[in-house]
Amino acid sequence: MKGRSAILALSAFALGGGESLAAEATVTWIDPSCGYFIMKLPDGNPAEAFGLFSAKSKPTPQVGDVLEGEVQSTYEVEVTDRNSGRKHALFHWANAKSPEMLIRNTPVQCASRWKRKD
């Protein structure tokens, strides 16, 4: 009997009972020296409004690109550029409430990490 209940629950989930995690995020900053970039994540937790990402391969997304996919779900993310249809494979490194927090914590090879504010 328990087996039937589990099968029914999984069937209901597969037929649309589950919620999709796909969302849109906008690229707001990129460091071409290292390929890391920041996206404004979908509305939700204000403490995690921005995400730090890097692309697995070139070309990397550009500032202003709107990417669709499960940007908040896992470490490895597959997204699609809404305008061009180009697919990107990304690594999701961290989230923060402001882009400045993420820029300060980019890897040492990123030139913008060492850029001074005037």
Image: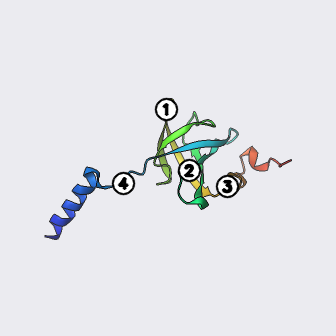
**In this view, 32 is above or below 46:** above
Label 4–label 1 contact, CB within 8 A: no
Q: Earlier in the sequence, mark 2 or mark 1?
A: 2
Looking at the image, which is closer to me, 44 or 11? 44
SS for tag 1? loop
In the displayed orientation, state which residue is furthest to the front: 43
Amino acid type for the residue under numbered disc 4: Glu
Residue 1, picture quadrant: bottom left
Residue linked to disc 4: 19
Looking at the image, which is closer to me, 71 or 66? 66
Q: Nearer the viewer, mark 4 or mark 1?
A: 4
SS for tag 4? loop
Tell me: 5 left or right of 88.
left
User: Residues under labels 1 and 3: Cα distance?
Assistant: 27 Å
Label 2–label 4 contact, CB within 8 A: no
- Judge the density around disc 4: few (<14), some (14-19), many (≥20) Cα neighbours within 10 Å: few
Residue linked to disc 1: 86
Residue linked to disc 2: 41
SS for tag 2? loop
The image position of residue 76, as x and y in percent, is 49, 50
Amino acid type for the residue under numbered disc 2: Leu
Residue linked to disc 3: 98
Label 1–label 3 contact, CB within 8 A: no
Tell me: 7 left or right of 43.
left
The image position of residue 56, as x and y in percent, is 54, 42
- Judge the density around disc 1: few (<14), some (14-19), many (≥20) Cα neighbours within 10 Å: few
User: Residues under labels 2 and 1: Cα distance?
Assistant: 19 Å
Q: Nearer the viewer, mark 1 or mark 3?
A: 3
What residue is at 22 percent from the left and 55 percent from the top? 11
What residue is at 54 percent from the left and 38 percent from the top? 66
Amino acid type for the residue under numbered disc 3: Ser
